[in-house]
Image (cartoon, coloured by chain):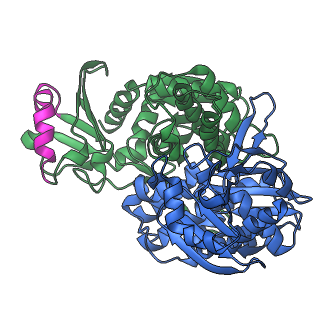
Chain colours: A blue, B green
Amino acid sequence: MVAVDWGTSSLRGALLDADGAVIEERPFSRGIMTVAPGEFPAVFEACFGDWLARSSGLCLVSGMAGSRQGWMEAPYCACPAGFAEVADQLAWIAAPPRGWRIAMVPGLSCEHTCAGLPAVPDVMRGEEVQIFGAMQLAGLRDGIFVLPGTHSKWATVQHGRITGFRTFMTGEVYALLSQHSILSRTIAADAPFDDAAFAQGLAQAQGQDQGNSGLLHHAFSARTLSLFGRMEAGPLASYLSGLVIGEELRANTASTLHANTEVVLIGSANLTRRYAQALGHQGVASRALGSEATWAGLRALAQAIT
Amino acid sequence: MVAVDWGTSSLRGALLDADGAVIEERPFSRGIMTVAPGEFPAVFEACFGDWLARSSGLCLVSGMAGSRQGWMEAPYCACPAGFAEVADQLAWIAAPPRGWRIAMVPGLSCEHTCAGLPAVPDVMRGEEVQIFGAMQLAGLRDGIFVLPGTHSKWATVQHGRITGFRTFMTGEVYALLSQHSILSRTIAADAPFDDAAFAQGLAQAQGQDQGNSGLLHHAFSARTLSLFGRMEAGPLASYLSGLVIGEELRANTASTLHANTEVVLIGSANLTRRYAQALGHQGVASRALGSEATWAGLRALAQAIT
């Protein structure tokens, strides 16, 4: 089969053999933002047509290609949702070229409720496939799955189904603070990672003395430490990263993490390493997976429908 | 006397009579960012020279004009600090024109300590004068003084001295999220204020159900409420404002506010109204003051040195 992860800013595909092993992988800088309405079939065929001709003709596409702005909308599937629910709601392309079978994988939605307030929806698109793949690869049917990134996701899996999740705008807030706020004047955003400064930021974000004033307060310390000559521009980037990731973890310590939880991290090695360090700082064990989780998830879905 | 508030992006002055009443006020768009090194005396004389010729020749300048990037540096005065400490550390211009007496008012610094971590400095410049003025106008020698803005300040005053304070990057984070994040696509940042949406944001930020996932999580709800058609672009701006201000208050509820605290708010009516509503939501009473606090504070300092 052919497995495709078609996001906002990138497009990646993998040709898998009958056992799910990756025969070939291809990245393209053709995220859905670069594709005009109506052009999706042509872009798809140019990127992966030769693979489909060589394979069973089945292709599952996860990510923003299934959104309203993508190839074809696959409406969000409500949590709790496992393989079966998502497989049932695949959105099949009506008239694909050459009799191929191509489907968009739906994203997931859930509702957060707080007493006395209107329910607030949350969404993911693409991450659900990574979680399904990680469940397969790690042999887990229960656990906490964390996908760090621009919009980090914390998902709870019970009995093989995703029962709920929360989004945190951690990566985006870090980028805004380090590149567009007053802090950008004294931070070297491209400096190499500094372990000690990251750990200091984490500890600051998670401190419990006199309550904890939170990120809106702690972020300003990245300015004052510079102003008073107590931290250089390079380490400041890692310090701020620690403050922001530490804030995300603090929120989850309060609501999601419990003693003896093991967390499965899914993402780039650069990010999962920071989260593993941050979780370790709170005594929480974790294991990390990368892009292999996407292919494993799409293959597991394909098996659920064949 | 002449009282001047010379900030990063704006310059305002007031000519005060012997009783402290404002005879005339003048705003200029000549913040220190627009003034080249060495040009400060000329800009000052062009703006306020006629006033000094008509008055006692005494002028106190608060704000960023006293920073390293300003007219002349007035180093931070360490907390606890009252009128006496600040008056002692005024930085007098060495050779002012025509024998005038012109001084920069120092900002304040304090240190935040958290067990096992290096101390973290905090700073204000200009707000200390507003707090001194508010103490005079409100007849208070103790209390919590809150100055909402780009970088909000929460200061504690005991026995007439500022004993400590915390900065929150609330206004800047609101601007970044509403104008530069993914939320900017669906938020009408210039929409009129919407009371109900603001209250909903506040309540969301302050909810205690299942812990509270904090601003990094709640901010994303401004996207999903739009995505699911549950809130329009106009109210979303006020909702996000409620989320961000609510987060600032939540942090202070944990560390600064106690039952029966009365808070003095100092700032523009647009902001102090929102904070009064937010504080009221937590059962905390407040009163509000505007720019008159700056002139009262500079006058009180002048009296302390004459």
Measured as percent of width and height from the top left, residue B210 is found at 82, 45
x, y percent for residue A134: 77, 69
**Which quadrant is home to the N terminus of chain B?**
top left
Q: What predominant SS class does the magenta segment belong to?
A: helix
- The magenta segment is B38-57
Which residue is painted at 88% across and 63% down in the image?
A142
Question: Which residue occupies the foreground of this view, A8 or A71?
Answer: A71
**Residue at image x 49%, y 65%?**
A46
User: Which residue is drawn at the image coordinates 65% and 50% (left, top)?
Assistant: A93
Asked if residue A74 is positioned above or below residue B306 in the image, the reply reads below
Judge left or right: residue B127 versus residue A120: left
**In which quadrant of the rendered view does residue B296 lie?**
top left
Residue A180 point in image, percent of width and height: 41, 53
* B122 within the magenta span: no
- x%, y% of residue B44? 15, 39
Asked if residue A31 can be seen in this view, the reply is no
| Residue B47 on the magenta span | yes
Q: Name the quarter where the C terminus of chain B is drawn.
A: top left
Give B233 or A228, whichever is nearer the viewer: B233
Quadrant for residue A277, please give it.
bottom right
Residue A157: which quarter of the image?
bottom right
Tell me if residue A134 can be seen.
yes
